[in-house]
Amino acid sequence: MKKLVIICCLGLFASATLLGQDKTNLSDAEIASVAVVANQIDIEFAEMAIKKSRNAEILDFAKRMVQDHQAVIGQASALVSKLGVQPQDNPISQSMLADARLTQKELRKAPRKAFDARYIANEVAYHKAVIEAIRDVLVPNTENGELKELLQTVLPALEAHLGHAEMVQKKLGK
């Protein structure tokens, strides 16, 4: 299970490191892409859980992730349309997607009994990494005030997701 958690977060930690080293490396359009990709990745993890899990706690959590992260993507899409900006693919978002594919592969291989624990451990680690990347890297490097505000507005919801995931993880451990 540690391998799975490590895989899922490598892209975000590497992304945070890369962004921190060269603050001019990503434009706001590329930062918007990173934010959209991070949300899309979690939707895909949740959709997998909805198909594979039979645990009510996991299913409720996964459904919440789909709903909430789709709403954030909607807000981001509306903002970039308003600003006349298109999120731009970049090495960070590409790395995140590649790492997510590896995590999805590991989750697909997990036996049904082990899936729930692996999925929720991934969600805990993923939300921690996303929160850290937004707080410490994306927000400080975003130039557009409205994009920065959107990123800051999303943080409390992500922190609530993390708390929910940790609660589910604790219940599964009993």
Image (cartoon, helix red, strand yellow):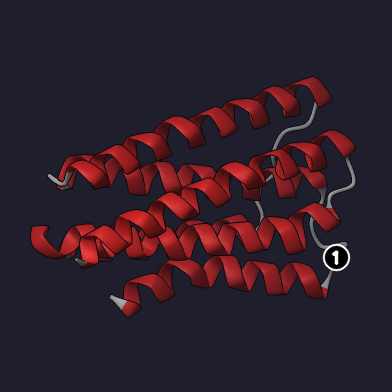
Q: Position of residue 7 (x, y in %)?
A: 41, 72
Return the x and y of residue 160 as percentages of the image width and height.
Answer: 52, 47
Three-letter amino acid code of the residue under disc 1: Lys
Residue receiving disc 1: 23
Is residue 145 found left or right of 44 in the rendered image?
Answer: right
Residue located at (41% from left, 40% from top)? 65
Please tell me whether mark 1 sits on a helix, a strand or a loop.
Answer: loop
Q: Nearer the viewer, residue 149 or 47?
A: 149
Position of 148 relative to 83 (above/below): below
Position of 34 with respect to 82 (left or right) is left
Q: Position of residue 168 (x, y in %)?
A: 31, 54
Residue 153 in view of the camera: yes
Mark 1: few/some/many CA within 10 Å (<14, 14-19, 20+): some
Q: Which residue appears at 45% of the width and 48% of the height? A: 41
Residue sitting nearer the eye, 42 or 89? 42
Residue 4 point in image, percent of width and height: 33, 71
